Each structure stands twice: as C-alpha cells, then as structure tokens.
Image (cartoon, helix red, strand yellow):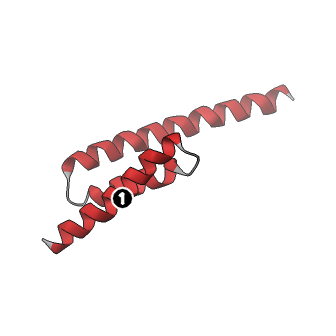
Amino acid sequence: MLRKTLITIAGGVLTIAGAALIILPGPAWLLLPIGLAILSMEYPWAKVWLRKSQRQLNASAAWLDRKILLRKMKS
C-alpha cells in the first residue's frame, strides 16, 4: 500500500508538472513521460498514455530530422 501511494504521489506530481509546462516555459517533454513511466508501474492507463507520448515524441523527432536534412540539402 505504501509503495502504491509513493508511486502515485511521485508520478502524479511529475505528470502534473509536465502538463503545466506544456503551457508554461519548461521541459514538459521531459517531465511528462517520466511521470507517466512512474505511474505505469501501478496503473495500466498510464502505460497507454506513456506509449502514446513516446509515439508522438518519435514522430516529432523524425519530422525535425527531415526539416534539418532539407535545410542542409538546400544550402
């Protein structure tokens, strides 16, 4: 019971902080997945959202790689 409580508090705080940093300046892309990873140790719904965020981060990184490659090819 103590383990689940600590996981819920730690993961919840990091996830909420990450969500707030989507709007505020800060590393939301770092805190949000870490919070979800902690929560996914106890909650299946957090694992689903963690996988969604991982897919989004991969897609964003691939998009950025393509943009950088195109700029290098143009110059």
Question: Is residue 7 shown above or below 73?
Answer: below
In which quadrant of the rendered view does residue 38 lie? bottom left
Which element type, helix, strand or loop, lies under badge 1?
Answer: helix
Residue closer to the observer: 75 or 41: 41
Q: Position of residue 23 (x, y in %)?
A: 51, 40
**Along the line of sight, the residue nearer the viewer: 14 or 42:** 14
Q: Determine whether, in the image, residue 34 is placed left or right of residue 43.
A: right
Residue at the far left in the pictured view: 1
**Front position in the image: 59 or 20:** 20
Q: Position of residue 37 (x, y in %)?
A: 34, 56
Q: Is residue 40 left or right of residue 17?
A: left
Quadrant in which the C terminus appears: top right
Q: Amino acid at mark 1?
A: Val
Residue at the far top in the pictured view:
74
Q: Nearer the viewer, residue 57 or 62?
A: 57
Percent from the top left, x then y, of residue 2?
17, 74
Quadrant into which the N terminus falls: bottom left
Classify residue 48 by image quadrant: top left
Q: Residues within 10 Å of mark 1 (few under 14, many from 20)?
A: some
Q: Is residue 75 found left or right of 69 in the rendered image?
A: right
x, y percentage for residue 17? 43, 53
Residue drawn at 50 percent across, 48 percent down = 28
Q: Measured along the vertical axis of the image, is residue 71 above or below residue 55? A: above
In the rendered image, which residue does mark 1 sit on?
13
- At a point 22% along the width and 45% down the height, the residue shown is 45
Q: Is residue 35 above or below residue 50?
A: below
Q: How many marks?
A: 1
Q: Residue at x 26, y 65 (%)?
A: 7
Identify the residue at image location x=38%, y=51%: 16
Q: From what the image shows, is residue 63 above or below residue 40?
A: above
